[in-house]
Amino acid sequence: TIKITPQRLRKVRRLIESGEIVVRYMPSGDDHHGGTAAYNHTYDVIKCPVSSLKKLGKKAQMMHELVHAAVDVYQPGRHKITEDEGAGNLAYAVFVRYVNPQEDLSPIYPPGDPREPLLRVTWNLAGKVLKGESLTQAEQFRLKNAVKANPTYKQKIKDQDNSTIFDGV
């Protein structure tokens, strides 16, 4: 199980400040991630595809990547992609709900978009996390299934046998 706490995220911030984890501006097209934020655990680099993080969604994307970095720092080893990406997506939703609890999710994905169910699941679970409550096993299962069904992760899960290895920072 992946565990993310404010203390662990502060440690990631300190590692970024010290240069042990690098945040690099990489506009879309510069790598295989196609213009999205990404964390490379081999080189300890967070790729930022935008030069400015003024928009809430871009800040939340970086929060997602900080979670991957925190896993690399505190829980190196093999992890299920469904758990790792579930934690990242949940952090995204917690960040957005914390900053703007009235955020309307409908403009993010059009109705019927296959990515929308994961966003709905994480949005609902974020409310619970913000109340200081832990997720039940059933809720964790629902989150993992939403990640599995999301087209962004489907091929990655298949190609990597639903696991990724974090080597530590």
Image (cartoon, rainbow, N blue to C red):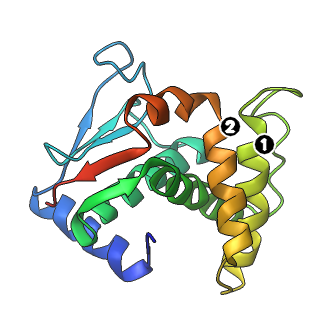
- Decide which of tag 1 and tag 2 comes sooner along the chain: 1
* Residue nearest the observer in this picture, 87 or 62: 87
Is residue 99 visible to the viewer in this orientation of the structure? Answer: no
Q: Residues within 10 Å of mark 1 (few under 14, many from 20)?
A: some
Residue 47, image x, y percentages? 30, 36
Q: Tell whether label 2 touches label 1 (CB within 8 Å).
A: yes
What residue sits 13% from the left and 60% below the top? 169
The residue that mark 2 highlights is: 149
User: Does 131 sit above or below residue 157?
Assistant: below
Image quarter of residue 50: top left
Disc 2 element: helix
In the drawing, does residue 77 fall left or right of residue 48?
A: left
Question: How packed is label 2: few (under 14 Cα within 10 Å), some, or many (20 or more)?
Answer: some
160 shown above or below 75: above
Mark identifier at residue 117: 1
Q: Position of residue 42 (x, y in %)?
A: 15, 44
Q: Residue at x 38, y 24 (%)?
A: 33
Residue at the far bottom in the pictured view: 132
Whole-percent x and y of residue 76?
Answer: 23, 64
Could you tell me if residue 45 is visible in this image?
yes
